[in-house]
Image (cartoon, helix red, strand yellow):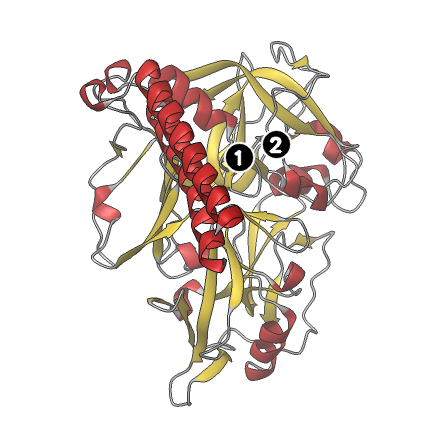
Amino acid sequence: MDDMGFHTDISFTSVLFAIATLTTLALAKECSSFPTNPIPVAFALTDCTTAPHDNVPKANSKGIIISLGSPPQELCVLPSTFTNNTFIPTVEVCSSDQATSFATCASRRGGLLDMSASGVNFSSISAVDDYPPDVNWVYIDETNQYTQKGNITLSLPFEVSLPNFRIKTIEGGQRHNVGHFGLSGSSPVLQRLFDERGLVKGFALDAGSQSSSDPRDGHLILGGYDPGKMGAESKNFTLENIQLPSKRVCFLYVLITELVLSRPGLEDFPLVSKGEQIPACIDPYDMLFRFPNRTLQALAQATNFDNTTHPDPSQFLVVEPGLTYPSPDAFNGSLKFTLNEDFVVEIPREELAHPLRGIDRNGSISVLSNITELNVHYEPALVDTAVLGRAFLSKVYLVVEYRSTGSLFRLAKTAAGDISAGPIPFEPDCTDSSNRLNGGQVAGIVIGVVIGVVVLLAGIILCIRFY
């Protein structure tokens, strides 16, 4: 009896799998409809200074440069897997900011969209049907009282223009910094580039380095990657779109299965021991590591963090405050991560510790050389889920592909001296017409499979009744 029940479950599973697979084959785009050599869209990920415009001063920030409207307004945004949509801060955000100067606020946001300027041509939209959901945005604006939806012209490098591109503007609140360039699984910008230019939905990210001794720029590539950055040691991960207990959606989900603090002349200090598992989200929007409370407290204790170094934010704003120490040589160590049991990467001191950086009242980047900041956020991560941001990605090349046959992301360890080979497009997400089943063939096979399973189930039922 139990054995028959097992086979019944297998039959249902087989039907669902067969139908899903055959439908995917039928609906996949034919390769002949793709351009032969689509050109990926590449950005420099760097310290960016936006051009002043209208009533908005220049902004000094970190990220990629995009332009909105015509004539274009430059803004610095960060690639984000926290959101699907692109979120852009407006002048209204800083007009209501009483804690810092307007120039400081503008640099904190990577520039501001002036909706009142001529040529913006922002067309508000009340319907939400054409917007993919942003489940995570509730942590920034719980009631959506500060966001507005609308169309605008988005200009990207290589003279790529996307008219009537749908964005969400941010018009208030203080729980946000630079604008989000949404690259999660339902990203409108990736969808438009797929529909209009044949670029496979996906991206590659070299986070660069913010080392104070040897900084370097990185890059963001849409629809392709740089093979020169794909080191010998790499690992593929399934993109699972995990929903965490807090309802936060994590697209680039991994497990930290070991984490060690290593310091010269001292025994290695385990922050996450073998046998433990800490869930983690990789997100290039964040600069700093964010750790669960227990891990954060262990690190703070091991490094003698005393929580007494706090510059006046009205004079020196630290956008992402990390652990700080009142000495220029307070930290000398590295963090060695093991992800999913077998991917090991070490983040050295130069990518972890640096003189404290902030934004002064004039909106310029400033440094306090007598204070050391560790690239670990001083507050615990939400719901015991770590965040691995650009400090982690300084030593790891990230490649993400959202494919109809299954999405994945790849992590590749980078090394000093890696040479860029230039961007190449991803392999097309399509089916060759010579191997592709047409709709009638698929329908016939599906109907045959269903009839066969019905006959099989009828036989099982008769066996149960009479035997």
Vertical relation: 435 (above or below) 137 = above
The kind of secondary structure element at disc 2 is: strand
Residue located 37% across and 19% down the image: 443
Residue 271 position, x and y percent, is 51, 78
Q: Is residue 328 left or right of residue 178?
A: left
Residue located 53% across and 47% down the image: 465
Amino acid type indicated by mark 2? Phe
Residue located 63% across and 59% down the image: 321
Residue 223 visible = yes
Q: Is residue 154 left or right of residue 218?
A: right
- From mark 1 to mark 2, how far is it between C-alphas? 7 Å
The mark found on residue 87 in the picture is 2
Residue 241 position, x and y percent, is 52, 45
Q: Within the image, what quadrant is residue 293 found in?
A: bottom right
Q: Which residue is mark 1?
A: 182
Pick the front one: 268 or 72: 268
The kind of secondary structure element at disc 1 is: strand
Marks 1,2: beta carbons within 8 A: yes
Seen from this angle, which residue lies furthest front? 466
Residue located 74% across and 45% down the image: 100
Mark sitting earlier along the chain (1/2): 2
Amino acid type indicated by mark 1? Gly
Vertical relation: 359 (above or below) 373 = above
